[in-house]
Image: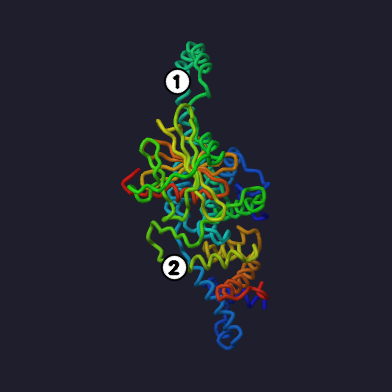
């Protein structure tokens, strides 16, 4: 991921080697900011929604978020010019892409059938809202990757165009163009049509 | 059109309002359609706000609480063990020197190097059923008529649609270890093992999740997803290939009787 150049550590970035702790301290001395593990847990909900929209699977989203935090919290992390949420989304995306690349070598997962509904133990989501969320995330998940990532970063996670551009390693104008087309496609899919001619 | 489309997208989510854009949209049916599409998509996405499951939140919070602190290259738990080791070093050396012969003798008589592990339970479960499944327990709705030291196996048919499909019985270091197999959607199979006797040692390097006072440990061994926890002082292990850990956690959390552990 080209945008990883500005961040000291981005676990899960494929072939990019993880930085050692002494290097991280050097970054901190050079003006880097250390991630506070206690604050990272505040972003679980947004990360979960991002993972669901990226993968299209609630079960895969849970595993993805678990893996993301396991990587981030394995050792102290130092970041530059990026907020915690943007950093977490970057790691989540790397983890997701790495998992997809190696999916062919893993056993295929079997999702619990849609008719088996588990109650929301927090009681904060009605059945109707849950259904709408599932349909929306399903529509996002079928978009081509670059369009999906732009929409997830901005509309699902709530990053600014600038933050999204940094996380995805591209220009702001590119993010906005992809966003425009991704939204058109999502609306058409939700209306029961196809995204042909939009993307 | 590229710049105009970007401006419409930014207007729809409130990021930026280009001068005169609203008037231009109002005067153009085509731009109005484009703007409405953008606005609808933004609303739909922002309305989709399912919270993370409680088990996931608990697992992340627990992991964050035990994470190494900033500027410290040694995780807190490892640092504590290291410091304790340094304080005890003289006494430990003396003990090791005097107990060396005894330790060799103990290793020589242990049949398998110590207590069985959760991984070994999963390995046995992977061998598959050797007997038919137990029947539902008429006296305990939601349970099967099979148990280890009073700890019953669940009947998941009504709650999840998983149907018991077989069973096997093994012995692990003189402990009974019984596994009931459940068939789920597609060709998914889950093995539910209960080990008799005292609980097994907790596996290392496992992810943890806490729910309703129970601590669940999740790990992967030889391609099998494994969730382990304790019920009434007994180690229970659910394992499967090709079934997400999150699904195993949901199955493990379910209780046919809320008053039971």
Q: Residues within 10 Å of mark 1 (few under 14, many from 20)?
A: few
Position of residue B25 measured from the top left corner of the image (x, y, whole percent):
57, 84
Position of residue A12 measured from the top left corner of the image (x, y, whole percent):
61, 48
What's the residue at 46%, 64% (across, down)? B49
Q: Nearer the viewer, mark 2 or mark 1?
A: 2
What's the residue at 32%, 47% (across, down)? B139
Position of residue A74 measured from the top left corner of the image (x, y, whole percent):
54, 42
Residue at image mark 2: A129
In three-dimensional space, the C-alpha distance between marks 2 and 1, rounded to whole angstroms, equals 58 Å
For the N terminus of chain B, give its image quadrant. Answer: bottom right
> Which chain is indicated by disc 1?
B
Q: Furthest-left residue in view? A: B259
**Where residue B239 is drawn, which disc sits there?**
none
The kind of secondary structure element at disc 2 is helix
**Where residue B88 is drawn, which disc sits there?**
1
> Which chain is indicated by disc 2?
A
B191 or A124: nearer the eye?
B191
What's the residue at 58%, 60% (across, down)? A54
Image position of B182 with respect to B175: above or below: below
Residue A82 visible? The answer is no
For the C terminus of chain B, give its image quadrant. Answer: top left
Position of residue A131 measured from the top left corner of the image (x, y, whole percent):
47, 67
């Amino acid at each position: 991921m080209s945008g990883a150049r500005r961040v000291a550590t981005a676990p899960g970035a494929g072939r990019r080697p993880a930085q050692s702790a002494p290097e991280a301290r050097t970054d901190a001395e050079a003006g880097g900011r250390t991630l506070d593990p206690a604050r990272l847990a505040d972003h679980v909900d947004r990360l979960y929604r991002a993972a669901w929209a990226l993968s299209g699977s609630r079960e895969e989203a849970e595993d993805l978020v678990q893996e993301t935090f396991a990587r981030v919290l394995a050792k102290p992390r130092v970041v530059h010019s990026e907020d915690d949420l943007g950093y977490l989304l970057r790691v989540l995306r790397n983890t997701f892409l790495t998992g997809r690349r190696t999916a062919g070598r893993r056993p295929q997962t079997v999702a619990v059938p849609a008719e088996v509904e588990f109650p929301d133990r927090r009681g904060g989501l009605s059945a109707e809202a849950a259904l709408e969320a599932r349909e929306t995330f399903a529509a996002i998940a079928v978009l081509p990757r670059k369009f999906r990532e732009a929409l997830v970063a901005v509309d699902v996670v709530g990053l600014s165009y600038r933050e999204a551009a940094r996380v995805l390693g591209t220009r702001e104008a590119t993010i906005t163009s992809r966003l425009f087309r991704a939204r058109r496609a999502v609306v058409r899919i939700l209306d029961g049509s196809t995204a042909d001619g939009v993307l | 059109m590229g710049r105009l489309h970007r401006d419409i997208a930014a207007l729809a989510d409130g990021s930026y309002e280009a001068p005169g854009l609203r008037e231009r949209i109002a005067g153009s049916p085509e731009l109005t359609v484009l703007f409405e599409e953008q606005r609808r998509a933004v609303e739909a996405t922002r309305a989709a706000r399912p919270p993370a499951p409680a088990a996931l939140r608990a697992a992340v919070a627990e992991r964050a609480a035990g994470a190494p602190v900033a500027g410290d290259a040694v995780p807190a738990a490892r640092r504590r063990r290291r410091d304790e080791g340094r304080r005890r070093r003289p006494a430990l050396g003396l003990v090791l020197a005097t107990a060396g012969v005894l330790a060799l003798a103990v290793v020589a008589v242990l049949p398998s190097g110590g207590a069985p592990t959760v991984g070994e339970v999963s390995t046995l479960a992977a061998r598959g059923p050797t007997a038919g499944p137990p029947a539902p327990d008429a006296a305990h709705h939601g349970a099967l008529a099979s148990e280890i030291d009073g700890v019953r196996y669940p009947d998941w048919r009504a709650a999840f649609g998983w149907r018991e499909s077989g069973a096997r019985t093994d012995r692990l270091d003189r402990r009974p270890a019984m596994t009931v197999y459940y068939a789920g959607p597609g060709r998914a199979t889950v093995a539910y093992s209960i080990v008799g006797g005292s609980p097994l040692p907790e596996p290392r390097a496992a992810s943890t999740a806490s729910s309703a006072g129970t601590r669940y440990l999740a790990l992967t061994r030889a391609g099998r997803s494994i969730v382990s926890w304790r019920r009434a002082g007994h180690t229970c292990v659910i394992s499967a290939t090709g079934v997400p850990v999150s699904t195993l956690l949901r199955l493990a959390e379910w209780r046919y009787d809320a008053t039971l552990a």
